[in-house]
Image (tube, rainbow, N blue to C red):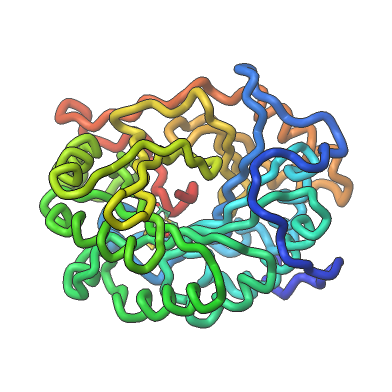
Amino acid sequence: MTDRPIARTAPIAPAAGSTIQPAIQPAIQPAVDPFGRAITYLRVSVTDRCDFRCVYCMSEDMAFLPKAEILSLEEIDRVCSAFIDLGVRKLRLTGGEPLVRKNVMSLIRSLGRHLSAGTLDELTLTTNGSQLVRHAEDLAAAGVRRINVSLDTLDPNKFRAITGWGRLDGVLDGLAAAKRAGLSVKINCVALKGVNDDEFHRLVEWCGGEGFDLVFIEVMPMGEIGADARLDQYLPLSMVRASLAERWTLEESDYRTGGPARYAVCRETGGRVGFITPMTHNFCESCNRVRLTCTGTLYLCLGQEDAADLRAPLRRSDEDADLVAAIREAVSRKPKGHDFVIDRRRRGPAVPRHMSVTGG
Ligand code: SAM
Ligand code: SF4
């Protein structure tokens, strides 16, 4: 499989506003799970590789997948397009680091045709920001309107310690480029006890000043990263929120982006502050998401092992009938929810695969 650029099949027009309501009905019967949840949001990990080694995400000696196992850009485009035909309205590219995949911009431009056609509401990505300087303008031109950028600290030394070998300056330059390109930015910050818990006020202030939304994430037990490391890192967001409330007035908001974050507006900065709490609150009832790995495995739930192989039906035929049938069969098995627990009796991770494999 090659990583050659994908030929553009339709002119790219600016994306419509990112309402999550379907404007155009899917061509075929939408995929609905056994609990009546329509699958409208697909997250796609376009690569398992990354230029960082964040402590909570990867071990230092990560083994990456052989190229033959990885879907080509054309194959990713085909699977995404099949999902869009089945009613997916929001597509998030993630990884690994999506922007380190060779020619990924050609995939993004190609997927932008669904925005122009009105069959997709939003095309977005989650990135560590290291390559944004190069790509911000192209992303905007392809129809991307919002991006999530992961940033756990504003301290350059701490940044390097958390990310393995990331450079804070490079990410800050990338964020400036994103702003210039007109992209809305949401900062993802994993709350880590004893690591960045002294910076939460500063992050609220800084994001408010920059016009970025800020979302705190609880560290999740995914992938083997070393004994007890995660127990030591885990910080419930209820505590983060309580500590923020000492300085900021957080007013509840019903703002939603189609993801699991619950938002408040910070009265002093005017910025939105969100919380993703997989550990302390189960947000599964309204789950509209499935996740595709770069090898074509479809995970029905971030916190469960149940999965379906889409690569075999994809490669079996140029027609999409088998692929669509495999997607429907998988969605019919979507579990009700996850059961993440971090406790001392359970030594290993709840889910053995790393976040960089499934895509956060
Ligand atoms: N490389 C990109 C990035 O860092 O934004 C995209 C992939 S990364 C796996 C997606 C998100 O997952 C990041 O915001 C990261 O902080 C988060 N993440 C990774 N491992 C996590 C874990 N064990 N618990 C909670 N969040 C995690
Ligand atoms: Fe890479 Fe993102 Fe994982 Fe950090 S969180 S190691 S940037 S994939």
Judge whether 178 appears above or below 306 on screen.
Answer: below
**Quadrant position of the N terminus in the picture:** bottom right
In the image, what residue occupies the spot 52% across and 57% down? 94
In the image, what residue occupies the spot 51% across and 33% down? 301
The answer to whether one can see residue 114 in this image is yes
Q: Quadrant of residue 182?
A: bottom right
Answer with the quadrant where ligand 2 appears in the image.
Answer: bottom left
Q: Is residue 78 left or right of residue 233?
A: right
| Foreground of the two, 225 or 289 | 289
Q: Quadrant of residue 200?
A: bottom left
| Foreground of the two, 71 or 36 | 36
Tell me where residue 10 appears, x and y as whole percent: 86, 67
Tell me where residue 247 appears, x and y as whole percent: 15, 49
Tell me where residue 348 appears, x and y as whole percent: 26, 36
| Foreground of the two, 65 or 307 | 307
Q: Is residue 87 left or right of residue 144?
A: right
Residue at far top of view: 35
Tell me where residue 217 appears, x and y as whole percent: 33, 46
The answer to whether one can see residue 2 in this image is no
In the image, what residue occupies the spot 33% across and 53% down? 57
